[in-house]
Image (tube, rainbow, N blue to C red):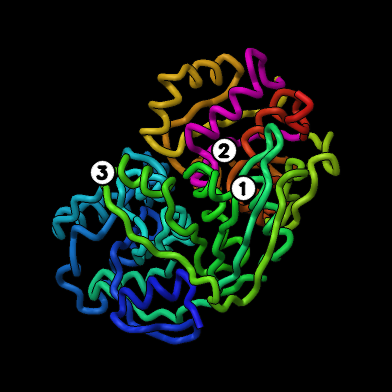
Amino acid sequence: MGATIVEKIFSLKCGHSVRAGEVVMAPVDGAMIHDITGPLAIRNFFEMGGKEVFDPEKIILLFDHQVPADSLAAAENHVFMREFARNQRIHNYDIREGICHQVVLEKGRAGPGEIIVGADSHTCMYGATGAFATGIGSTDMGFVLKFGALYFRVPETIRAEVSGKFQRRVGPKDLILSIAKDIGADGATYQAIEFCGETFGTMPIHGRMTCCNMAIEMGAKAGIVPPDEVTYAYMQSRGRPGRVSIESDPDARYAARKKYDVTNLPPQIAIPHNVDLARDVGEVAGTRVDQVFIGSCTNGRFEDLADAAEVIGDRKFDESTRVIIIPASRDEYLKALQAGLIERFVKAGALVEAPCCGPCMGGAFGLLAPGEVSLSTSNRNFRGRQGSADASVYLCSPATAAASALYGEITDPREV
């Protein structure tokens, strides 16, 4: 019986054949903490008797959720983490680069065949480069900081094979929302989702990031795209040439096999208050929106911003709708700036903010008042996620968000 790519990664790291369901202690190739989860992980490290981290070169420490500090508590957390980085000689540390998940990939800190953990559930985004990447709790991260390894139960895998070519202004975000609807919010609990098929074979790396990012929204432990020429080209652009040939065997055993065709897939909208409540855009078109947010680790890359700008053209946003646009990182911001997108957004009426998580988790700015409606390109629309528990959050693609911002109501971008 053959092995899945996830089983092969764990077998490679453990030095012996490993199968789904086994519990193993596996070394990690990287560990990421940020300004929200980091302080607790560091305190757990000290409570476990930690003196020096296992390898300062393998630890990534970033500020993105509350940066610049928006409260005294946030400022104190920042000081605590800066001191930890200085004392532990952690150089993979920054307060200005942007959202942790985007920056980890931009800096080449996750690649094919590696095991990466992060104290954030959307760490699974790194699976876009063929890594087994997963979010862990702060207690587990404290253990990792000390020992450089962690116990894992090797997950079973759901194979999601996707075929077809997207319609104009339909893309990876629409696909992953439709997959979430099919699998369900807990349909992949503690499993990995392997994204494959001809559609993924031609999908650029930014689209793969979007899909892997939202694997957790189905309860998955990880999302992963087997590495190919697209992967290797991206890794080389990140200063990591070379290849790690690793893919599932034809006779690998899967927990489930799913097939999808995007040929006739319309733009998707996840309605409140769950990600798996996806609907065709036509079913909710005309719903008034008070705020539109284009950004986040899910859809804050240059390509996402370019999709939004293409829809907007030279028009202005609806005057009664607040529009917040946040590039995912400094690199993505500079790309958008040099391409003239930032100027176009500002002229259209948007507030363009420095790279950070922004309204995504409702922790810094862009909060919703009771009764307000947000349309967001982020990854979660749980009750209270972006402010009041009496507000509503809908999820969509950048193209749909931009079209809707023009009219102040949910709009099919293909009709603009």
Q: Which residue is mark 1?
A: 387
Give the residue drawn at x 55%, y 34%.
Answer: 304
Residue 30 visible in image:
yes
Q: Are marks 2 and 1 in contact (CB under 8 Å)?
A: yes
Q: Nearer the viewer, residue 97 or 386?
A: 97
Residues drawn in magenta: 289-318
Q: Nearer the viewer, mark 2 or mark 3?
A: 3
Q: Nearer the viewer, residue 127 or 364?
A: 127
Q: Is residue 187 left or right of residue 294?
A: right
Q: Which mark is residue 366?
A: 2
Q: Which mark is residue 239?
A: 3
Give the residue drawn at x 40%, y 83%.
Answer: 18
Seen in the picture, residue 161 relative to 358 is either above or below; the reply is below
Give the residue drawn at x 69%, y 34%.
Answer: 400
| Local secondary structure at mark 1 | loop
Q: Is residue 237 left or right of residue 194?
A: left
Seen in the picture, residue 333 relative to 40 is either above or below; the reply is above
| Local secondary structure at mark 3 | loop
The part of the image, by quadrant, that contains residue 136 is bottom left
Spatial CA distance of label 1 from label 3 is 40 Å
Q: Is residue 346 left or right of residue 110?
A: right
Callout 1 crowding tier (Cα within 10 Å): few <14, some 14–19, many ≥20: many
Query: Is tag 2's residue or tag 3's residue first in the polypeptide sequence?
Result: 3
Residue 40 visible in image:
no
Spatial CA distance of label 2 from label 3 is 36 Å
Query: Is tag 2's residue or tag 1's residue first in the polypeptide sequence?
Result: 2
| Local secondary structure at mark 2 | loop
Spatial CA distance of label 2 from label 1 is 8 Å
Query: Is tag 1's residue or tag 3's residue first in the polypeptide sequence?
Result: 3
